[in-house]
Image (cartoon, helix red, strand yellow):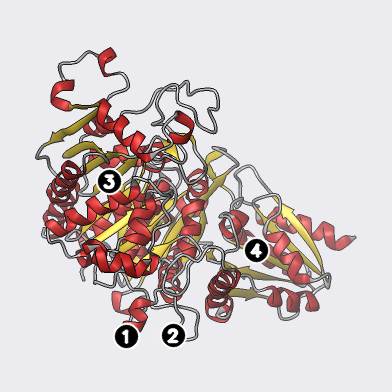
Amino acid sequence: MADRIASTYPMVKYLRREALPTALCPGCGGGTVLNAFANAVDDLKIDPKDMVVVSGIGCSAWIASPYFLADTLHTTHGRAIAFATGVKVGLPDKKVVVISGDGDLAGIGGNHLIHAARRNVDITVILVNNFIYGMTGGQVAPTTPFGAKTTTTPYRNIEHPLNIAETVTAAGASYVARWTTAHVYQLIDSIKKALTVKGFSLVEVISQCPVQFGRRNRMKEPAQMLRWFLKNSVSIKRARNMKPEELEGKFVIGEFVNREKPEFVDELNRLIDEVYGR
Amino acid sequence: MRYPFVTGGSDFIQGDEAIARAAIMAGCRFYAGYPITPASEIFEAMALYLPLVDGVSIQMEDEIGSIAAIIGASWAGAKAMTATSGPGFSLMQENLGYAVMTETPIVVVNMQRGGPSTGQPTLPAQGDMMQAIWGTHGDHMLIVLVPSTVQEAFDFTVRAFNLAEKYRTPVVVLGDAEIAHMRERVNIPKPEEIKVVNRKLPRTPEEERMPFGDPDGDGVPPMPIFGRGYRTYVTGLTHDESGHPKTVDREIHERLIKRIFRKILDNKADIISYHEYELEDAEVAIVATGIVSRSAMRAVKMLRERGVKVGLLKLDTIWPFDFDMIKKLAERVHRIYVPEMNLGQLYHLVKEGAEGLAEVTLIDKIGGEVHTPGEIVKRIERGERR
């Protein structure tokens, strides 16, 4: 199987072959995200030796490690961004990327996400949002839609989901975009921008988990979930003229922000130069 | 290298300040922290000094992020430290285990205050000894050093960095609020007088590919740090020598964890340090560590004046623990007293080491005051009259 992937898939040069085929379930959106990320790296001609990829815990964390062939740091649950901050300060010339899930980065690790965005530290975060804790068996997440069924909300979810892209925009990131796994070319484009922009960048990818989320919410086929994404996606431009009740249950997609702002490691090194040179 | 403080001379400084200066002289160039009494002065000194030596000090959003950032920085090649007290140390436990599992050299300082919970923020205690040793989950091994003076706060911090680098392990410096805030005269060596140890780096392509191998047979793998094109794979999951997860293989798990134990336990003679006072002819011994050992030392002098043949074994390292040394001591004396600022932690280690050859008696004290020498004398006199 691994040999077949190697002979037919051009992006395999970015993957750890010994870890293939992936452990992701059939129909999982994680493969699409990995593919989009590899294509973005390929388009930008970034040498993976100049990258450090950091992840937390969960299915989406596996996209980074073991699958991506760079220096990889597979850390504790929720803390990937804090680890990545230390890596970036230590290696300011390298591209530092965090790939992990919604529960990991916006649930248990939400505080690190907000503060890294506030500092505007030059890290690219690819946050795979599948609305669910997949690896542990389909428990409710801070992103689970209102009313959805999960293993820990077997009747219905009474909480409202966190709007991750808007939260990170408000916290001060340089670049924020949201796409779904049904928007692969736009996703690649945004990942490229995120990797290029100076400052904290977040690409939120709405992704399907047919096994743990779809199955319990009348979308057990991956294609049903992708059709759900397409049918309910609204561009951010159009969303700006829509009322909150019209946006209920919609996925607002596009670029939320793309702005030049002072970056943390730059500021830090400027300060050290000032003080050290004195 | 020009240091922003006196070197090759003495200075009158707090323990927290001594730890910061020692860290910088040992090569620490990355500090991440979160404010907490009584360790904040370490952070403040690092924030002041590090930019002056081309280093970085950053404030994270919590203690979990602080230890995460220093582990990240260590993999980026920097010598890195964080400092905290009880509540923050509790938050750091998961990532302390991550540093054990990924064999990341870091130094974590815990200036103990009264606990549990918020407890007595400004007052000293020794209630975190078992937590320093066993706080994180799973079978693990690390090094814990306990200073008793501001001079030792300096010396042990240098030592902590060297041990962390030499054995690719986290090292805990376990001080207390008394050492943190007390001012004492400290001799700060000249930079060239300080022995600085650096981690082993890969020397061959094979070692580059084996971040968790054992090419030297000493259990300490060379560290293929990030950014040099090694494409190192680091995970807290059980992994083989190449770093790849092997989470259901019993033999690989056992081989990994036992090597992590072995690299420390096989080098006890190098790691463990202690001091003996008046033990040659002693019939009664005191075993103490940290700030309390100073009262114990005075108590030995007072008791000797009264004709009690008592001596002191002062431990600098509480983990790994030298159980054999305690056994040998227990063979020579009939009773061992363990004064400590908790309700019995070191006591249990000493009791295990004594193997019943001598009676072991706890002299506990909590509430934020160090035992006075007189209190220790009284307890021993009462105990020996029986």
Chain of the residue where label 1 is placed in the rendered structure: B
In space, the residues marked 4 and 3 are separated at their CA atoms by 51 Å
Instruction: Identify the amino acid type marked 2.
Output: Pro
Q: Kindly tell me whether residue B20 is visible in this rendering.
A: no
Mark on residue B204?
1
Secondary structure beneath label 2: loop
Instruction: In this rendered view, identify the residue nearer to me: B203 or A103.
Output: A103
- Alpha-carbon neighbours of circle 4 within 10 Å: few (<14), some, or many (≥20)? many
Instruction: Identify the amino acid type marked 4.
Output: Ala
In space, the residues marked 3 and 2 are separated at their CA atoms by 37 Å
Instruction: In this rendered view, identify the residue nearer to me: B331 or A266.
Output: A266
What x and y, as percent, mark residue B217? 49, 86
Instruction: Identify the amino acid type marked 1.
Output: Thr
Is residue B193 positioned above or below A142 on the image?
below
Of the image marks 2 and 4, the number of the one nearer the N terminus: 2
In space, the residues marked 2 and 1 are separated at their CA atoms by 10 Å
Instruction: Find out whether the residues at labels 2 and 1 contact each other: C-beta distance under 8 Å.
Output: yes
Secondary structure beneath label 1: loop
Secondary structure beneath label 3: strand
What x and y, as percent, mark residue B8? 31, 73
Labels 4, 3: one chain: no
Q: Which residue is mark 3?
A: A126
Question: Which residue is at 46% across, 68% downward?
Answer: B169
What x and y, as percent, mark residue A84? 30, 53
- Residue located farthest toward the left when viewing the structure as drawn: A260
Q: Kindly tell me whether residue A234 is visible in this rendering.
A: yes
Q: Mark 2 vs mark 4: give the one in front.
A: 2
Q: Which residue is mark 2?
A: B215
Instruction: Identify the amino acid type marked 3.
Output: Ile
Of the image marks 2 and 1, the number of the one nearer the N terminus: 1
Chain of the residue where label 3 is placed in the rendered structure: A
